[in-house]
Amino acid sequence: MRHIAIIGSGPAGYYSAEAAQKKFGDEVAVDIIDRLPVPFGLIRTGVAPDHQSIKAVSRRYEKTNLGDNVRFVGNVTVGEDITIAELQDLYDAVVLATGAPHDRVLEIPGSDLPGVIGSAAFVGWYNGHPDFKDLNPPLDARSVAIIGNGNVALDVARILAKSEAEFVGSDIVGHALDGLKQSGVEKITFLGRRGPHQIAMTPKELGELGHLERARPVVEAEDFPDIGDDAMLEPGMRKSVNHLRSFLIAAADAEHKPVEIAFDFFAMPIEVQGDGRVEKLIVEKTELDKDLRSIGTGERYELDCQMVISCIGYRTPPIEGVPYEHGRGRFANSEGRILPGLYCVGWARRGPSGTIGTNKPDGFAIVEAIAEDIGSGGRKEGRAGLDRLIASRGIDAITFRDWKKIEEAEIARARSGSPREKFTDIADMIAARD
Ligand code: NAP
């Protein structure tokens, strides 16, 4: 029997568990440990609440949990309740699938002013992550600056721009919906430090901006390169740029929509200013060098805004004793191997890029590496040892069956038209199990 502990119950964790099941059949016991009492990580608290079709992949992860050889062990914090070293003593392989839940820091003066928020916090707030339920973003802001030109920036802008009716069918949490209903946002500005050909927004997601009920995307013709240059782009990027160009054409028809979503390209924020809260951003115009990196031109402008949301990427939090690559914000690893018996997968391995599906080959590859390293069989005690530690420390671990009860309670309390109303408090999650 091989004993594998996976830390983190998001996509990378579940695809690794599924791969272990497929590779080893009955000869494996996998424990997926999560600090929250509820599973699915990024699917629950990262993927936008109005993207339910993406969230549906959790049904696949649920199937992984049906057999006895995969367990969910929630409400257990590795590094606090149990150490990595203890897990390494108990399991033949310990796989860190902890994702990248911390924001990359916006290192400009004034970024500590109230009203400057990282995307992890803002996304966590509207998705009901217990860590961010009390964020209370300043939704009285009329103008919001969003730093970054990636898909997270798009999610954030769309959520800020949607009408209440556009959230029907979503599982946006009640506190966020109530806040957004009162919001005074009239203008949302994306600040991209490079140009339309360098965006990290994918076509489907960018296309959605063109169909919002009360918001219209606005781009400036002079920011675009010659249309002939689009031919050099790879097909996905070409589609995205086509969407941007279509916003130019659609602008006249959309003028009646009250919320403007402006794309400021070649725009690098260099300072946040305000008296006790954000009042404006100082932005430097940029140009591209021969390697397509942005460099400042010295020309500056001011953007009035009362909230700044930086969507510039994420970092994996370090764990004591685990080698870490500070520059890239992920565990130091060679194709997922960190130390003998210790592995990482998903964003914790390669950094925060790719879609949910990218984690599938990742999970399968790490299980191949584990199979190679363990050989014909494991030597460790596995879950019996974990259960003993959990019991001796009085930890209230949550099983998958418990989670199903929590889920039932969330479904039962959903507002009309919504699939669930998530609990945002850990104590409430645990109480729903009892
Ligand atoms: P991302 O795709 O890496 O985009 C980050 C953006 O921030 C880039 O435009 C980058 O510009 C900019 N940036 C980075 N540092 C900056 C700085 N110091 N100042 C100004 N701008 C800066 O990251 P993400 O949006 O967080 O998304 C993470 C991953 O999740 C991506 O793979 C994304 O596709 C995926 N995702 C997918 C979906 C979906 O499919 N629906 C939804 C959300 C997220 P440069 O290019 O100039 O570095």
Image: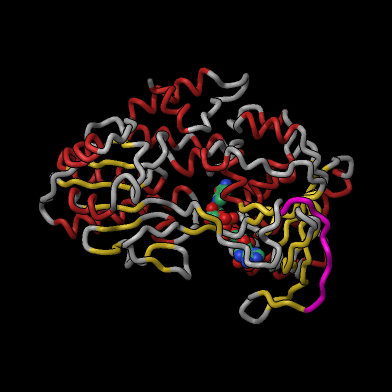
Which residue is found at the position 34% from the left and 66% from the top?
Answer: 323
Rendering coords of residue 156 (x, y %): 66, 47
- Looking at the image, the residue that sits furthest to the bottom is 290
Q: In which quarter of the view is residue 419 placed?
A: top right
Up the image or down, 268 lies above or below 12; here it is: below
Quadrant where the N terminus sits is top left
**Magenta highlight on residue 407:** no
Q: Which residues are magenta?
A: 298-308
Which residue is found at the position 65% from the left and 61% from the top?
Answer: 199
The one nearer the camera, 17 or 33, is 33
Which residue is found at the position 16% from the left and 56% from the top?
Answer: 374
- Mark count: 0
Rendering coords of residue 412 (x, y %): 51, 17
Q: In which quarter of the view is residue 399 placed?
A: top left
Taking 215 as reference, is 75 left or right?
Answer: left
For residue 226, say whether it is visible: no
For residue 8, say whether it is visible: yes
The quadrant of the rendered image in which ligand 1 is seen is: bottom right
Rendering coords of residue 155 (x, y %): 64, 46
Taking 354 as reference, is 344 left or right?
Answer: left
Secondary structure character of the magenta stretch overall: strand
Which residue is found at the position 34% from the left and 31% from the top?
Answer: 398
Up the image or down, 80 lies above or below 302; here it is: above
Quadrant where the C terminus sits is top left
**Magenta highlight on residue 306:** yes
Taking 335 as reference, is 326 left or right?
Answer: right
Q: Please, which colouring scheme is shown?
A: secondary structure
